[in-house]
Image (tube, helix red, strand yellow):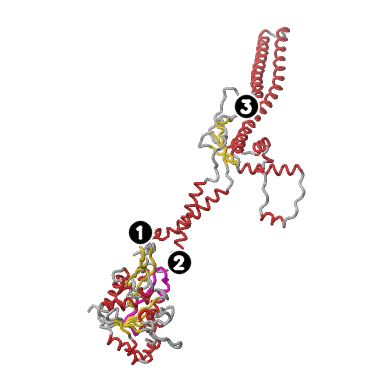
Amino acid sequence: MYDPARRIFTPQTQPPAKDEVVGLREIYQFLRISHRTILLFVLLFAGAALAYCLITTPIFTATAQVLIEPVRAQSFLQEGNAVETVTDTGRVESQMEVLKSDRIGETVIRSLGLIDDPEFQPGPPSLLGQALDLFRPDPEPMSEADREAAKLAYALNLLSDRMLVRRVGQSYVVELSVRSKDPAKAAAIANAITAAFIETDISAKAEEARRGSDWLNERLTALRNQALQARRDLEQFKSSGEASSATEARVKLAELESTTVSHTKLYDAFLLRYIETAQKVTYPVADARIVAAAAKPLTRSHPKTLLIIAFAGILGGAAGVGTSMVRRRFDDRIFTGGAVTRHGVDLLGTVDCVRLRQAPLRATPISSDRLLAIAADMPRTRFAADLRTIKTSINTALLDRAASCLGVTSVSDGEGKSTLAANLAQLFALSGSRTLLIDASPGDPVVSRKFAPNAEFGFVQALAYPDTLSRLISAQPSVPNLFVLPLGTVGERVSPIEQMASDRQRLQLDDLRKHYHVVIFDLPSLAAAPDARAIAPLLDGMILVAEFGRTNAGALESAVRSLETGRGRLLGAVLNKVDRKNRAWAT
């Protein structure tokens, strides 16, 4: 025969745990719950980035381009039509290093007077540097030349840090970028560097041509003397005619003429090269030329406000997601019905957080007195509908029992157990069942204050004098079939539940079952007192109340284990004060 109660009371084996799969629905729920935190971090990071951009000194970048000619410099001994084309990148890389060299930098610094520019001078030492200077020995005094050298070295290092030289693709164009706080100064420095580079190359070419011209001049003197001497020897032989025979005379004459012609041609060739070299000394041609001079930049290159704010926003979003994940990982509050059932307890139902609308645009929480009777006074509310669902779940679990004694407790105080107990009692009474509501919560007897505010005797006295029980129970005229046993005056030694849990009081529950169909005990919370655990074995079922967004999963699991350890019959749990508009709520 099917026994609905057996399904609830019989321990069931837990199904094997499945690996959690994160899908679009889970991601959507996570973003819906955490979007405020993520947005807050995005705004904080973006605001910090904006503040950084506003207080940071702007930096301007000027850019110039130089074309490196794809030929080697001609030697002064090469023919004018001899051109050697470069096929490797070594020439361009070498010229880039020359462009970044200290020789070019020193020329620019001295020509523009940057050595005395405040931007190229060391600033005041930081607080940490000043503190460290206290423990360092006093430096030796420097001469004027040493100070100038130190200032020049600092300016060179700073200029090197603010200068960027790169090759444009695979071309022979080299791009030079210079950063400065002053846009005009950045353009002036970039143009000065390219001009110094061109002038250095021209000077090197002129120096090479001058040295070649000097060598050619000396060589021409020797060649001229050799040509003149060959001419004299030829003329002297012709005039003297010294030879032993006619054949020997012809051979000697041909030799002297050949020598004279060779020396004359060599002299003429060197003379022509000397003239060309002399022209190079006066008008040398550089192996590089300026393609585009640097212009004054109109916009700052640093800080890039939009880029920094966008990056900060992305970083803030990542930080917000990480923070939300950590909070969600360590936040074990109960927000869903699934979170209740994961701890080995059935979910009897959920109850909405009740608010009474008093004006069209104003909503305030309902008063506690009226909240205890909302199921009878406002049966069409969502709260009453939720309670009827819970009542149906309880009836299904107790089909085979003619009369039932139920206990309502909570994980901790303030979770609405008394409200739930009072309204459930009214629903049972309205359905035709004789119902007795017993206030057994000494900590906060709200049931007694609502239904018997002036009662001085009640449940406590009935335990001491069982014969007076019928006189202490009061019928409620507003709700037919509803009877209330108030708490009464509580002593300080033993709680009423401990008295009822003693052996001599067991028969009293049987007496109550004879007169009432449903007996509901409003018990203290499990965190406040062990009363609920003590009386649980005597009752037909226990109802555990947990509050939405407040009860911790660990506390719920501990409460369930406490009731099961005390051999109590836990019918299930109720998730109370559910805010369905809360983004953490998910069915």
| Residue 514: x %, y % from top left | 27, 87
Mark 1 Cα shell of 10 Å, populated few (<14), some (14-19), many (≥20): few
**Secondary element at tag 3:** loop
Mark 1 / mark 3, whichever is N-terminal = 1
Kindly indicate whether the residue at mark 3 contacts the one at mark 1 (C-beta within 8 angstroms): no
Q: CA distance from mark 2 to mark 1?
A: 21 Å
Q: Are marks 2 and 1 in contact (CB under 8 Å)?
A: no
Find residue 435 and report its horizontal and vertical position in percent.
29, 81
| Residue at 68 percent of width and 9 percent of height | 249
- State the extent of the magenta-drawn residues as a range: 537-558
Q: Is residue 576 visible?
A: yes
Looking at the rendered structure, the kind of residue marked 2 is Phe
Residue carrying label 3: 75
**At x 46% / y 56%, what residue is drawn?**
318
Q: In the rendered structure, which disc, 3 or 2, sits on the residue that comes first in sequence?
A: 3
Residue carrying label 2: 330
Residue placed furthest toward the left: 1
Secondary structure beneath disc 1? helix
In magenta stretch: residue 556? yes
In the picture shown, does residue 81 fall above or below 192?
A: above
Name which of mark 2 and mark 1 comes first in the sequence. Answer: 1
Which kind of residue does numbered mark 1 sit on?
Answer: Arg
**Magenta residue check for 380:** no
Residue at 48% across, 52% down = 313
Query: What residue is disc 1 on?
Result: 25
Along the line of sight, the residue nearer the viewer: 234 or 20: 20
